[in-house]
């Protein structure tokens, strides 16, 4: 098969589409013929040499995919060859085939195109596990989402609105904020021109945000705590603004607030399976009913992964950027090369 490899860490040009050995599904795994994958910030970090896959995971980037089951490994039940699925991965999505633990598979939701289903697993599992399973967002509460127009952000807006919460977002352009409003966001903050602490306080009559979903880390740490409501919960899922910051513990104590920080990739299989099962139970009916949908900015051929990374790093997108596996022509053989 072919896959995007990273012979040496570096810029987008470090991504190389080349021939590699086919994966073999192990105990409890299935082999998926990939139709599409999606680009995540973690893929960019891996390309730069800062975020290696966990032990035993595929060395190729790609934390989610959609496709069809090509083979079942030993001990797998409940799935059949030919089933159309999407999957949460520890790596390997940028490839023609990938071996996936059966507990991390999801059926393609009703009404969703197979390619577009690749935009769902990572963002839905991230949002549901952090905002609902850990931070316990409830109807009537206010959720602040930093990076509201990102893949994570567009999903968080929809899920929060679906359960009856009020949603505030930050984004850097008028166009992105307008799109967030179309998805249901109630409070729009242009972080380039406005102070989100003051804007959230004003919009909530001084109450603050009950839950904050943060991708920035250190840069926003103290200001996020200032923005929290009493009994508020800050869920940190990224470090785009740095890894080390100062925090006023007094403010945190006075608000009786909580901070959590998680990532999905290195979690034990049983924890990932529990999150996937919760997503299938709670989110998939919303997707099938049309209340929640994947937001896809563009699709690019997988050999052009370098261009997809450039788009992500430039923040020239709203929602997800997909990588689509080229169809093989009968009687021909793919040739490797750099994208």
Image (tube, rainbow, N blue to C red):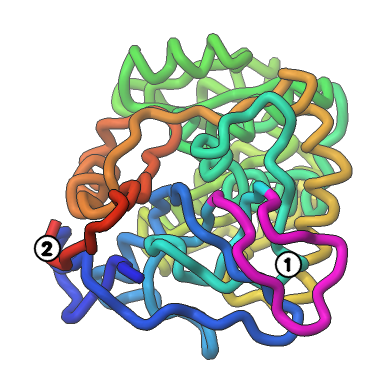
Q: Quadrant of residue 18?
A: bottom left
Q: Is residue 52 left or right of residue 185?
A: left
Residue visible at 79% across and 45% down in the picture = 132
Q: Residues within 10 Å of mark 2 (few under 14, many from 20)?
A: some
Q: Earlier in the sequence, mark 1 or mark 2?
A: 1
Q: CA distance from mark 1 to mark 2?
A: 33 Å
Q: Which residue is painted at 58% across and 39% down in the image?
A: 117
Q: Residue 275 in the image: x percent, y percent? A: 78, 58
Find the residue positioned furthest to the front: 331
Q: Which residue does the numbered mark 2 point to in the structure image? A: 338
Q: Secondary structure at mark 2?
A: loop
Is residue 96 depicted above or below 193 in this figure? below
Q: Quadrant of the N terminus?
A: bottom left
Q: Report the predominant secondary structure element of the magenta stretch.
A: loop
For the C terminus, the quadrant is bottom left
Vertical placement of residue 157 versus 126, above or below: above
Residue 102 falls in image quadrant: bottom right
**Which residue is rendered at x = 78% and y = 71% of the image?**
271
In the foreground, 131 or 249: 131
Apparent side of residue 73 relative to residue 308 in the rendered image (left or right): right
The residue pinned by badge 1 equals: 272
């Amino acid at each position: 098969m072919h896959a995007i490899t990273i012979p040496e860490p570096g810029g987008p040009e470090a991504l190389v589409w080349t021939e590699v050995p086919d994966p073999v599904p192990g105990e409890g795994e299935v082999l998926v013929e990939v139709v599409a994958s999606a680009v995540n910030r973690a893929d960019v970090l891996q390309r730069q040499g800062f975020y290696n896959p966990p032990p035993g995971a595929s060395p190729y980037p790609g934390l989610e995919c959609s496709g069809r089951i090509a083979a079942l490994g030993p001990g797998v039940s409940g799935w059949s060859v030919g089933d159309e699925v999407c999957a949460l991965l520890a790596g390997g999505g940028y490839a023609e085939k990938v071996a996936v633990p059966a507990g991390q598979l999801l059926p393609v939701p009703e009404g969703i195109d197979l390619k577009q289903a690749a935009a769902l697993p990572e963002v839905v599992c991230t949002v549901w596990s952090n905002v609902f399973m850990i931070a316990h967002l409830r109807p009537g509460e206010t959720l602040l989402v930093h990076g509201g127009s990102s893949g994570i952000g567009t999903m968080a807006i929809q899920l929060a609105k679906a359960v009856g919460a009020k949603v505030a977002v930050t984004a850097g352009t008028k166009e992105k904020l307008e799109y967030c409003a179309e998805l249901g966001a109630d409070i729009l903050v242009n972080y380039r021109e406005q102070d989100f602490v003051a804007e959230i306080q004003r919009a909530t009559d001084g109450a603050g945000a009950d839950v904050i979903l943060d991708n920035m880390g250190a840069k926003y740490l103290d200001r996020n705590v200032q923005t929290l409501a009493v009994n508020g919960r800050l869920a940190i899922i990224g470090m785009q603004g740095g890894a080390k910051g100062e925090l006023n513990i007094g403010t945190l104590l006075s608000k009786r607030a909580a901070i959590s920080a998680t990532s999905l990739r290195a979690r034990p299989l049983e924890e990932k399976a529990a999150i996937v099962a919760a997503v299938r139970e709670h989110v998939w009916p919303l997707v099938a009913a049309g209340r929640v949908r994947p937001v896809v900015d563009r699709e690019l051929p997988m050999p052009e992964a370098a261009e997809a990374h450039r788009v992500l790093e430039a923040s020239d997108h709203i929602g997800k950027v997909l990588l689509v596996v080229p169809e093989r022509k009968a009687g021909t053989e793919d040739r490797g090369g750099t994208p």
